[in-house]
Amino acid sequence: MKENGKILVCTGTSGISAGAEEVIKSITNELANKNLLDKWQVIKVGDRGLFRDVLIDIITPQGSRFTYEYIKPSDVSKIIEKHIINDVPIDKLLAGKDYNQFFKGQTRIVLSNCGEISPENIDEYIERGGYTSLQKALKSNPAELIDEVQRSGLRGRGGAGFSTGLKWRFCYEAQSDEKYVICNADEGDPGAFMDRSILEGDPHAVLEGMAIAGYAIGSKEGYIYCRAEYPHAIKRLNAAISSARKRGFIGNNIMGSTFSFDITIVKGAGAFVCGEETALISSIEGKRGMPKIRPPYPAQKGLWGKPTLINNVETLANIRHIIKNGANWFASIGTEKSKGTKVFALAGKVKNTGLVEIPMGTTIREIIYGPGGGPARKKISLKAVQMGGPSGGCLPAGLFDTLVDYEAISKTGAIVGSGGMIVMDEKTCMVDIAKFFLQFTVSESCGKCLPCRVGLKRMFEVLIEITEGRGKNEHLSFLIKMGNTIKSASLCGLGNTAPNPVLSTLKYFQDEYLAHILEKRCPAGVCTNLLSFEVLEDKCIKCGKCYKACPSGAVQWKKGYHAKINKDLCIKCKACIGACDYMAIK
Amino acid sequence: MFKDNSQTMKQQDKRLRIVEQTMRKHGSEPHALIETLHAVQESYGFIDQEMMEYVADKLGVPLSKVYGVVTFYHFFTLKPQGEHVCVVCTGTACYIGGAKAIIDEITKSYEIMQGETTKDNKLSLVTARCLGACGIAPAVVYDGEVAGKQNAQAVIQRIGGWLKNES
Ligand SMILES: Cc1cc2nc3c(=O)[nH]c(=O)nc-3n(C[C@H](O)[C@H](O)[C@H](O)COP(=O)(O)O)c2cc1C
Ligand code: FES
């Protein structure tokens, strides 16, 4: 045996919460007991974006790879004994069909290193081609570089989808002695975590993208504005910055050139609006994160009044691949106007949830039924997917053949957004979801402009009325009118987009709103005030699942009979509704 | 546990030194305000008026502005947190997965709303927006430890365990 074997352990958020550290401890102990520590290397890798408790990969010295899922410390000795020593994989613990299906439909470019390398070891990044793009960039002139990025067709992944090359060009052309590069790592959509996984799993890719951007526009100073809720990502970034500085990839005279560029991390403090670029700049300057009217755009007048380039984490992580493989390669992936791949945080009522990276031009259906594996519960059909979080909208099941493409998705009323993709089934109430997002934007509105501050609040109040059974006919026209006014009259992107979740559910699911208002009924069984807790005998299949789920003994059931609910004992916890596969309780 | 007075004084000194260091690192410029407040919150657990006055004075920022910044950002708190902190994720995936029922149950059982602490200072209820653990929704953080696939009963049991051990 010449080469060493490797054991990779996934240490993302879910891995750690499932006990990855203990698994690592028992692996090291076992290896030590068997005197194998010099032959096998244990590597902590980042999140690969699939929740399987503790995932480990065994890469044999010959290079074959075996993935084990749901590993507990007690499994470790068996794996070492049978697989590592006797070379017999343990089939029962190997990752199964779902795991393979999840990765089969994906094209991993931005996420190619996540879950494969140790984010704390710069050598592993370099081994996989890291910092060669920066080296290549430093040999070409900035104008060529910007051309290349523009020709690739890369568009901002932070939400708006603006051409990255064009933005770089504006910053390049702006005349100033000082310019800044800012990486927007505020990741505000409350259901998205791809930026976090990139920062935690492959931090150098972001640093490399920033340095290339700095060289292209003529900036010496970069900032990463990272949310304080991501302490792990901040730690990894700090470590990455200092190791990159030591190797001369950032700092003075990078790789012996005349170009100098350094990066500072700034911690956010928990405000959604700070993801908006002008608010973000105010926040770095130490002020309340209030947006400003644009123009002037940050490219002309940004941080400390100087030209500033703001790009999202995923946008920057794409740069090194474009420089390395060329604009034509990147432009060959995707649709006419949307190029490359996009990472989505797939969650909600699908079988496999996690980070999915697919080429632009894939259909929503391919994502949900490919990597997603279809509905989480076979008998409950899917109703819609919500994209773009609080600024986005939903796309009903009838439109699942829509392509992932900025323009095609926008046409439906949803947006590609930053990549949150929440799948909803018959048990999700669309009025409740609209209310959820409005509650979010109401509490996140910075309060500077009236339409957003007051208008959203009024819409929210109306949604409370509707979901609590006091809805009136005229509420619907009010919501539409108010929503459109807020969209056109607000100062920043928060208000301009906040009514979308309401407007798009109204467009596709008006019948649900009407059921709440006219019949005082919540078809999905979510709005407690509108539930009568009665069993619908024509739908009930007498399975007894509700009986087993009820914590208060209110459900009466005997094999072969319909269930019945005793209202005196019912505590309205909805456990029965959750357990029913046939929507038989209203 | 009783600490003698000199020890608390010394500890306080150390905490203050961290804050001072942060300000110095940024040249005690007004733009260091948020970083400084992070340092205060990290070392003291919250930001009270005395600290706000101190920071305002050192950085040359009006107290009103310091207060404005502290209250603008969710991350900063004006009141100390309880001995135990239960963070319920209310991001989209967790909300759909039933986070609201969890919060309602805690609110009912311990008579605290989101962001509040029980009168005996034992328990604080905090909400977060997506912990990046959507695949194991609904997620709850118990004193810094993330747990997935939670429900109201499990949460009440876990909190009950905390409170019982100490009374
Ligand atoms: C309310 C609001 C929140 C935003 N939040 C984020 C965010 O969390 N992350 C992000 O990258 N962009 C966010 N944006 C978009 C930024 O303003 C900006 O367009 C983006 O960072 C530009 O980078 P890109 O061109 O690479 O996408 C937000 C915009 C608005 C209006
Ligand atoms: S929504 Fe709770 S972890 Fe993402």
Image: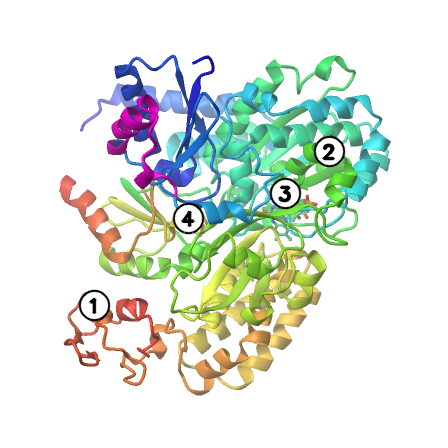
Q: Are marks 4 and 1 on the same chain?
A: yes
Question: Given the image, what chain letter belongs to the residue carrying mark 2?
Answer: A
Answer left or right for B71 relative to A245. left
Q: Nearer the viewer, mark 2 or mark 4?
A: 4
Q: Earlier in the sequence, mark 2 or mark 4?
A: 4
The answer to whether tags 2 and 1 share a subunit is yes
Residue carrying label 4: A97
Disc 2 to disc 3: CB gap under 8 Å: no
User: What residue did someone put label 2 on?
Assistant: A325
Q: Residue A346, how many percent across, how many down?
A: 50, 53
Judging from the image, what secondary structure is the residue with disc 1 in? Answer: loop
The amino acid type found where label 3 is placed reads Leu
Q: Which residues are magenta?
A: A74-95
Gap in angstroms between the C-alphas marked 3 and 4: 43 Å
**Image depth: mark 3 or mark 1 in front:** 1
Does the rendering let one see residue A292? yes
The residue drawn where x is 60% and y is 20% is: A244
